[in-house]
Image: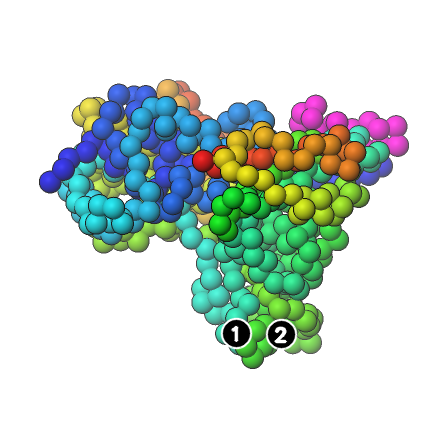
Amino acid sequence: MKEVSLVIIGGGSAGMAAAIEAKKNGVDDILILEKDNDLGGILNQCIHNGFGLTEFKEELSGPEYLSRFVKQVEELHIPYRLNSLVLNITKDKVVTYSNDKEGVVCLKAKAIIFATGCYERGAGAISLPGSRCSGIITAGVAQKYLNIHGYLAGKRVVILGSGDIGLIMARRLTLEGAKVLCVSEIMPYSNGLNRNIAQCLNDFNIPLYLSRSVSKVIGKNRVEKVILSQVDEKMQFIPGTEMEFECDTLLLSIGLIPYVSLLNNIDCEMSSTKGAKVNDYLETNIDGIFACGNCLHVHDVVDFVTDEGREAGRNAALYIKGLIKNSNDHITVTNGNGIGYVVPQKIENLDHESLTFKFRVRKPVNNVRVVFKSNETEVASFIRPVLIPSEMVMLKLNKEQLSKITSKELTVSLEER
Amino acid sequence: MKEFVCIVCPRGCRLKIDDELNVTGNSCPRGANYAKEEVTAPKRIITSTVRVNNRENLLVSVKTSIAVPKGMMFEVMKEINKISVSAPTHIGDIALSNVLNTGADIVITKEIK
C-alpha cells in the first residue's frame, strides 16, 4: 500500500492552511483530498466582501481570499486531488478515496487532518410543518445555484433563520431582482452578525421577525404560502399570531453541523459541538488524527478557520516527528454555566507559552465575568461587557495562568458582576 | 444623535454620531469614517457575478473597486448584468471602468484558467 506522511481531508480554508503550515514545518509528503472540482471549499460561492480583515488587514471577497492560499499550495508544490471523495478511514490511518482518474485508492498515512467543513440543517431537522412541495431549500444551496450556476432560487422569498448565510442571501437575492418578504427567527435574538443585519436587511427594508417561526408551509407542487407564528418561551406556536406570506420559495438558514460522518465509524469521541473532542494539539482521541475548521466547531469568520488550520498543520508535523503523544492522562475542560461549548475539550500538556480557548455563550449576556476554575480555585477571569451566541469568543491563558491548573478538571463558566 | 451598527468589519460596533459629526462607540478610525459617511453620503461595495462568454455555463465573480452610493445599488446591478468577459480571467482585471460615473470599476475577483 502506498504510504504518505500526512493526508488532509478537505481542500477548503482549513485544509489549505493546514497543508501550507505542515509543509513549512518540514512535512514534505502531503496529500490534500478535495471532493469538489476546485480547491477553496465554501469560499468559492461566498462572492461577498468581508473576508481577510484579520489575516491580510484588507477586505476581500471569498474567491480572492481563497486564491491567496491556492497560490501558496501551488508554490509549495503540495499535491492535491480534486473530485476525490474519501470513502473510509480506519483507526490505523488507512484512507480510501475514489476519483474518476485513479479509481479506488487506499493509502496509509502517518497522520490525518480532518478539514471537512460543515453542512446545513434542512427541513427534516426542525420537523418543518406543512407541505413538502418544491421551493424549500437551504440558503447555502441557493447561494451555490445563484453564484456558481447563475440560477435564482425564486422570485418571492421568505427566509427562516437569521444565520449569516440567510442574511447574505437576502441581500444577494434582492440585488438580483427577487423580493425577499422577511426573515423569521425562532429565537428572541438574531443568530447573525450585527453588521449583516445592518447591511443585508436594513439597507433593503427587509423586516426581521424575532420569536417567530414557520407554523405551516402551503403548496401543492411549489410553495404557495408560508405561515409564520409567534412562539412562547417553550418554543410552542401561539394561536392567533399567524402572519401569511404569499411566496414561491422558503429559504432555510437554520444552522450548520460539522461534517464528520467518517469519524463516527472509528469510535472517535464527539463533543457538544457535534464535532470531535480534541486536545490542546487539536488531536482527537485517535492517535494522529487531527481536526480543524468548521468540522471541529462552526466558525463565524474564515480568518479564524485559517488560523486553526495552521495550528493543526503545525501539530501534525510535531506528531509525525514523534514530538507529541496522546496520553490518557489529560485535563478535562468542561463548559459550565452559560457556556455552550469549549474547544479544546482536553489538555495534554500545560507547558505552552499560551493556550487559546474558543467558546460560545448559550444566550446573549451583558456585563459578565468569564471564569476559568480548576479545583474550585480561580485560574483566570475576563470581564466582558457583551457576549452573544453568534460570535465565537477566544480567550488566551498565559504560562502563569496555565500553571495554576492543579487538578484534572478545568471549567469555563459565566458569572454575573 | 443617530445610532447604527458599523459594517466595516465583523465586530459590528454600535456607533453613535451627533449633529456635529462626533463619533463615539467605534473601536477604530475606520469606524469613525464610516459613521461620518453613513450620515452624509452612504456608500456600499457591491459584489455579483458576470457571464464568461467563451466557457459553457460559467460565471465569474466581480465587485466594485470602491463603494458606490447606496441609492445607486440597483442601477449598478443593471450595468453589471450587461457585462460578459472572456476567460482566462485574473483577480483585479477591470470588466467595466467607471460604472455610471461613480469612479468605481467593476473588477474580477476570481481566477479562471
Same chain shared by disc 2 and disc 1: yes
Q: Residue at x 46, y 45 (%)?
A: A42
Quarter holding residue A409: top left
Q: Identify the secondary structure beneath mark 1.
A: loop
Q: Is residue A216 above or below residue B33?
A: below
Q: Which residue in the structure is indicated by mark 1?
A: A133
Specify few, some or many for label 1: CA neighbours under 10 Å numbering under 14, 14-19, or 20 or more.
some
Q: Nearer the viewer, residue B27 or A289?
A: A289
Q: Nearer the viewer, residue A179 or A359?
A: A179
Quarter holding residue A396: top left
One can see residue B92 in this view = yes
**A209 displayed left or right of A218:** right
> Which span of residues is magenta-colored?
B12-33
Q: Looking at the image, which residue sits at the far left?
A: A1
Q: Is residue A294 above or below residue A209?
A: above
> Given the image, on which type of amino acid does mark 2 rest?
Glu
Q: Chain of mark 1?
A: A
Instruction: Tell me residue B34's x, y (percent).
Output: 74, 31
Contact (Cβ within 8 Å) of mark 2 with mark 1 = yes
Q: Looking at the image, which residue sits at the far bottom?
A: A220
Instruction: Tell me residue A9's x, y (percent).
Output: 30, 42
